[in-house]
Image (spheres, rainbow, N blue to C red):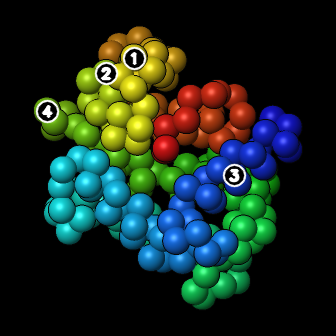
Amino acid sequence: MTATVANERLQKRFAKWDHDGSGRLERADFEQEAAQIAQAFGKSEDSADVQPIKNALIGLFDYVAQEAGSDGSVTEAQFMEVTGNLIFEKGEAEFNRTLKPLVQGIIALCDKNDDGKINGAEFATWLTALGMDRSQAAEAFQKVDKNGNGELSTDELLAAVREYHFGRSDVELLG
C-alpha cells in the first residue's frame, strides 16, 4: 500500500470518529459512534446488544490515547502516527488484537440466529446501517466471503477489516 492511500484511509477514519469536529478525538466521540450504531439498529445506546461495541470503541480510544501519550484527547497527527505504527510496524497480530473486540461486537449485534457468524443478510444489515445501499452490501459480502460458504466468522471479518487497512482490499467495513 502506498503511504498516500494509507493516509487517506486513516484521515477518513479520523474525520468519521471526530463527531464534534474539534480536530481531536475524545472518549465522547467514540461513545457517540456507539450511540449512532445503536440508533441505526433501532436500539438504545445502553442496550445489552450495543455494549460490546461501545466497550470495544472505548477500548480502541484508550489504546490510541495511551500509545499517543495522551490521557484525554488525540490530535489527528497523533492518531495518524499511532494507527500508522499499528498497521506498518506492529503488524497483523497486534492489529488483530486491537480490532478483534470491535469485530466481535459487530458480529454479536448482527447475528440474529446466534450461530457466532454473520450471513449475507446480517452483513447487509450492518453495512446499510453504516449508509451503504443493499446492492453494494451484497457485492461487498461476495468479496469478503473468501471461502464462499455464505457466512463470515470473527476471523474472516477481522481479516477483511485488516485487508482494507493494509491496502489489500477496497471493501470498507467499519463505515
Asked if the residue under mark 4 is in contact with the one under mark 1, i.e. CB atoms within 8 Å, the reply is: no
Asked if the residue under mark 3 is in contact with the one under mark 1, i.e. CB atoms within 8 Å, the reply is: no
Amino acid type for the residue under numbered disc 3 = Leu
- Report crowding for label 2: few under 14, some 14 to 19, many 20 or more residues within 10 A (C-alpha): some
- Residue 83 location, quadrant: bottom right
Q: Residue furthest left?
A: 113
Instruction: Residue at 85% x, 42% y: name it.
Output: 4
Instruction: Residue at 39% x, 17% y: name it.
Output: 135
Per the image, the residue denoted by label 4 is 113
Spatial CA span between label 1 and label 4:
22 Å
Spatial CA span between label 2 and label 1:
11 Å
Which is nearer the N-term, disc 1 or disc 4?
4
- Report crowding for label 3: few under 14, some 14 to 19, many 20 or more residues within 10 A (C-alpha): some
Residue 162 placement (x, y as % from top left): 60, 40
Amino acid type for the residue under numbered disc 2 = Gly
Q: Depth-wise, is mark 4 or mark 2 nearer the camera?
A: 2
Q: Depth-wise, is mark 2 or mark 3 nearer the camera?
A: 3
Which is nearer the N-term, disc 3 or disc 4?
3
For the image, the number of numbered tags is 4
Which is nearer the N-term, disc 2 or disc 1?
2
Q: Is residue 159 left or right of residue 102?
A: right
Per the image, the residue denoted by label 1 is 135
